[in-house]
Image (tube, rainbow, N blue to C red):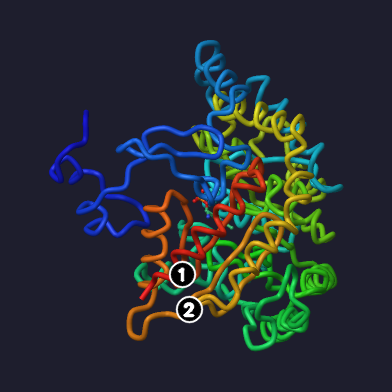
Amino acid sequence: MNVQSPNDLRAFWMPFTANRQFKQNPRMFVAAKDMHYTTADGREVLDGTAGLWCCNAGHARPRIVEAVQAQVAELDYAPAFQMGHPKAFELANRLVDMAPEGMDHVFYTNSGSESVETALKIALAYHRARGEGQRTRLIGRERGYHGVNFGGISVGGIVNNRKFFGSLLAGVDHLPHTHLPEKNSYSRGEPEHGAELADDLERLVALHGPETIAAVIVEPMAGSTGVILPPKGYLEKLRAITRKHGILLIFDEVITGFGRLGAPFGADYFGVTPDMMTTAKGITNGVVPMGAVFCSGAIHDAFMQGPENAIELFHGYTYSGNPLAAAAGLATLETYREEGLFDRAAELAPYFEDMLHGLKGLPHVMDIRNLGLVGAVELEPVAGAPTKRAFEAFLAAYEEGVLIRTTGDIIALSPPLIIEKGQIDRIGEVLSKVLRALP
Ligand code: PMP
């Protein structure tokens, strides 16, 4: 169908979108290649966000396209129930090989949200399998984003993701967020101040008793709530406290996984290994939905104790390890490796950082944060109209041919790791123009 009139847009209730606004003035992509999208009216838009933090190798990469095409013709689907297919195993081996030491197994899902639910369920069932079934409490963090399912919104710390949806999971607590603008504004990379915020976990342990706490889940670097970085030493402290009390530490690496920070995972970048990592997005370059939960040998092995013909974990999805996703994943990892894209991200990071911090002093700019190929420009909100200014910046940048994303009044950038320096310059020029022109 050719979408032409507003009536054609009625049926699709769009996710995370201002539907009524969009349908008056739709923005449609009809094609993509490498660093660019093509709009329905034939314009090229530079992708400053890797789709939605996921197309880390850029768009329509031939190896990935061909792998998916070949796979759908050869084996389109295999039941994710007492059956396997070779590529799911091959991809799991590759993933484990590239993961931090100790992340020895992967459980497949179809999205970041499902990876989070899976990890939380594994954490609860793991303690139970070891005779510590009283460990049921889950701890997240303010301003954490862990997808949109019930576990994820319960441990997450975004008010709008929580307040409309009832009472959520019981027995959840939250650490304070690590956004300290008065101390850390305009930090380049990890901020200096705030490691002591991790000590709040000791307070929660004392409050509830360590024997009641199953897991702590945090994003090593919070992405969707505006690029909030861990203060130096913060993650090490969380690791030490969780280990001391037998609490599992889960890193939600849906954004930080697969090279975004210039290392394979956030765990590598920060040098802190959790007990589980939740991933999605870059695992298949965003091409076919897929997620994976990485877990330690100790967690996996705790389940492998009962009768051999018994299902060890009552959990899984019809599309877990889907052949198309597995083929896309293998081709994606090969593209990352062959083109050295994680190293490339690390090499480009200082250039990207300089571009971003060059925006300091422009109208409305309150703070700038960055790490690897992730950046945020926080704008002063319009009084009484939060999100308005950043949304206008988004629309204006789109008109100028650059895709950014916004969260609240924060502009977030996360370009594909294949970006060229000239394209980084272009993002800077457009942002500068847009910010100067904003009311
Ligand atoms: N966790 C984190 C850290 C994320 O950034 C996201 C998505 N931005 C999710 C979970 C949810 O992923 P999905 O949208 O694939 O469900």
The label number, if any, that marks residue 398 in the structure image: none
- Residue 165 locus on image (x, y percent): 36, 67
Q: Amino acid at mark 2?
A: His
Viewer-proximal residue among 430 and 45: 430
Q: Amino acid at mark 1?
A: Leu
Residue assigned mark 2: 364
Q: Which residue sits at x=61%, y=52%?
A: 424
The quadrant where residue 236 appears: bottom right
Q: Is residue 220 left or right of residue 173?
A: right
Q: Are marks 2 and 1 in contact (CB under 8 Å)?
A: yes
Tag 2's secondary structure? loop
**Can residue 137 be seen here?**
no
Residue 333 versus residue 261 in the image, above or below: above
Viewer-proximal residue among 16 and 249: 16
Measured Cα–Cα span from mark 2 to mark 1: 7 Å
Residue with the most extreme top position: 74
- Residue 266 locus on image (x, y percent): 74, 56
The label number, if any, that marks residue 435 in the structure image: 1
Q: Is residue 73 left or right of residue 230?
A: left
Q: Earlier in the sequence, mark 2 or mark 1?
A: 2
Residue 405 versus residue 321 in the image, above or below: below
Q: Is residue 78 left or right of residue 107?
A: left
Which image quarter holds the C terminus? bottom left
Which image quarter holds the N terminus? top left
Q: Which residue sits at x=53%, y=77%?
A: 365
Where's ligand 1: which quadrant? Answer: bottom right
Viewer-proximal residue among 61 and 200: 61
- Residue 149 locus on image (x, y percent): 46, 56
Q: Which residue sits at x=74%, y=33%?
A: 339
**Can residue 416 be seen here?**
yes
Tag 1's secondary structure? helix
